[in-house]
Amino acid sequence: MEPMDLHPQTASREIAKEEEGAQVKVENGKPVVVIMVGAPGSGKSTFCDHVIRTSARPWVRICQDTIGNGKAGTKIACIKSASNALEEGKSVFIDRCNMDGEQRGDFLKLGNPEVEKHAVVLDLPAKLCISRSVKRTGHEGNLQGGKAAAVVNRMLQKKEFPKLAEGFTRITFCHNEKDVEAAMNTYSTLGLLDVLPSGCFGLKNPEAKVQLGIMRFLKKVDIPGKDGLVESNPQHSSDNQSAVEKDSGSRRPANDSAPSEYVHMDVKNTVSQESGSSIRTNSVYSIPTLAFPSISTADFQFNLDKASDIIVEKVEEFVSKLGNARLVLVDLSHGSKILSLVKAKAARKSIDSKKFFTFVGDITRLYSQGGMKCNVIANAANWRLKPGGGGVNAAIFSAAGPALETATKERAESLAPGKALVVPLPSTSPLSIKEGVTHVVHVLGPNMNAQRPNCLNNDYVKGCKVLGEAYSSLFEGFASILSTQGWMPKESNEKSLKSQNQIESKHHDGDQKVKREALNECMGGKKSKIFCNELKPNFSHSVDRKGNIEGRKNVESLNEFERNKNSGGFLKELKPSASHSVDRKENLDGRDDTGMNKAWGPWAQSLYQFAMHPERHRNDLREILDDVVVLDDLYPKARKHLLVLARVEGLDRLADVSKEHLPLLNTMHAVGLKWAEKLLNENESLVFRLGYHSEPSMRQLHLHVISQDFDSKHLKNKKHWNSFNTPFFRDSVDVLQEVSKHGKAIIRDDDSFRSMELRCHRCRSAHPNIPRLKTHISSCQAPFPGVMLDNGKLVFAPGRIR
DNA sequence: GTTCTAGAAC
DNA sequence: GTTCTAGAAC
């Protein structure tokens, strides 16, 4: 909308129609004070002179540089002079820079309150102002030549655009010569009886060039190679071993004191087996992996040679049952004896090095430091299942945060030697966010240390048996996780499904520990184990629901497996295929079947986990429905900031949305609206906006329901602000329209949005940095721009004046 | 996504 | 010296 292009009265009528809240008075013609705002060289004097020359109404230009008989005077003299002019019925231009609120304040008090105060902001490119200032001679303020550049630059750094809240009735922004011309015309043609409409006008086109001197922008950043992590994985290297290690090392931070590296057991074999782009697409994320420490060989002082035999024996037994999943033995040190023993023995037994290998690194930082994503890690737990004690147990509890302790406590209070306990890790845990770990399996091995409980006093007959049981429990626990997530081949699935059902049926009759024991018997069959994954006390509605979901999933993957088998066998699962739902599940990195989309890091998975497994996160969710779940944003960018997640596998972002999702989008909108209204009942001063990010950082389509105060300590940078206040934010109402009309939503994913200058969403004033912007928005009471009021984009409390 | 921090801007 | 941002690290 460009009101300056129209005759004032015409403009008034046009605006009256479009701008709610804009008050248009046409009955009288009172003098007006126009405060010019602009750097030296922005053209303020030229503007005033032009209007004065061409206007039908009497104007006075108050210029501090000339007010003292042609020489510079004081601000007080300016005010006095302006005041006199007003009394004579003349309109006044305050021709000085007026770059901040303090400078403008005194002029806003001029005359009686009836006198309208306008601002005309000449926000022209800094370069232009500087070049004009430098070139000119005979400037009234003696600002010319070399020193002009420095002064202009400094002023622009400190500029603070006027806002209606300061007391202006009208603010006109001019960002280029054309705007200036239009604004001059508006004031030139302002007759004695005309009154201009109130509000902020000449809003800068968000896509226009960013003002110099405010911020750097549009810096093209190289996005790390989407297959970077794949490259660092030995299994996906197309090069030889030494190249792999070198590559892996080069990705490590320089200060990484405990570098991780793969210890290959048969790299040649690995590489030769995997070639071609299909494997690359099926990135490291897509291979379910259990990382486990050597059990009992540290603090429990179990004989290393014997332990290594047992590890290799158990790995050999299980590795073939785990589909394409991997087992990785992890130890901290390069000189780890257990690793070298196991490595040698596994090589002798020709265990598939794709499925089992050893790894040197910190088990709590396998992804962030070692570049290896492990969705499950094992913990060498103590019998109390408590943090502390040192070693792996302390490290894992510490890295996972209190969430792990809570989740563990909900499932069991203690653990017997030889047993394992599967604990789904809440997605809020740092271990989940940073490392991509979804489950921790606590394992208790036999103890040969007299200083620790249940010492076996070197009884290695019993010790070896218990250690074997411990690994069996661990690997079966891992298998149960895979099966509930649809990773497992048919046989394991059936077993798991059966056990799952038994968990559920047993669960209804009371004591959880009894159930666990029963479960021990049903899982795996051979030895007693504990499998408590997914088991949570007091499941009512959600438990049943969860059971159904998990059951359905298993059936789906089972069918999928059948299909695979018929068309060439289980190995097919390793390859991506367009219609392969198992692959979709495996593609945790969020790539689509074309492999073209960006990879989702482990930190980007938590919403997906909420959407797919709401029953695990009931405490964190506001509402669980069939199609959506509602939760508070973990890092709210406003007083109220909720997310409505779609519960559809594979619907990761707005770009994935098509016409078939219209009912879902409608549901999301309706649920979002319902929550907005609920929150408005609690606080009617809030205003909500519902929309999507053009390209989300977190996987899983989510609708933001965010209050427009943006009052949050979590709103910290330009990207945060701009993701909600530029066209990057797609209003839900618009998305609904677009999808129903064209079958897809418009995506405005342009790097420039992130670095776009910071403008108030209400008065559209620009601010040099986030703290200043936040100070401004905390007090800006300007009405929302008309474009935001269109189409019900903003949700207000009933009866609230906008 | 957040956190951390070096270096730029003030 | 302090504030702020951008980019790297996680």
Image (cartoon, coloured by chain):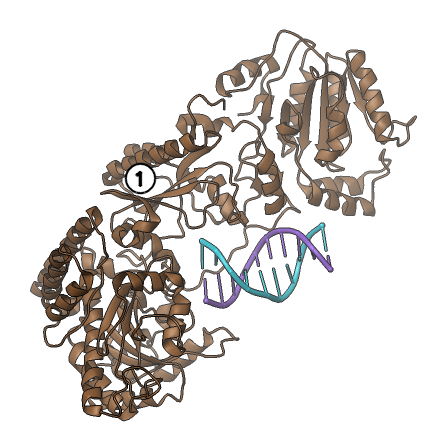
Chain colours: A brown, B cyan, C purple
Q: Which of A57 and A252 is in front in this view?
A: A252
* Quadrant assignment, res A534: bottom left
Q: Is residue A193 left or right of residue A486?
A: right
Q: Is residue A762 left or right of residue A381?
A: right
Taking the spot 18% from the left edge, 52% from the top edge, the residue there is A549
Asked if residue A45 can be seen in this view, the reply is yes
Taking the spot 29% from the left edge, 77% from the top edge, the residue there is A328
Residue A266 coordinates in the image, percent (x, y)? 27, 85
Residue A159 coordinates in the image, percent (x, y)? 69, 40
Is A28 above or below relative to A50? above
Q: Nearer the viewer, residue A292 or A89?
A: A292
Is A399 above or below relative to A555? below
Q: Which of A344 and A207 is in front in this view?
A: A344
Taking the spot 48% from the left edge, 49% from the top edge, the residue there is A751
Asked if residue A650 can be seen in this view, the reply is no
Residue at the limit of the structure toward the right, as seen here: A69
* Quadrant assignment, res A422: bottom left
The residue indicated by pointer 1 is A744
Q: In this view, does A665 lie to the left or right of A246?
A: left
Residue A676 coordinates in the image, percent (x, y)? 39, 34
Which chain is home to disc 1?
A
Q: Is residue A69 left or right of residue A652?
A: right
Residue B9 coordinates in the image, percent (x, y)? 68, 53
| Mark 1 element type | loop
Label 1 amino acid?
Answer: Lys
Residue at the limit of the structure toward the top, as seen here: A27
Q: Which of A132 and A752 is in front in this view?
A: A752
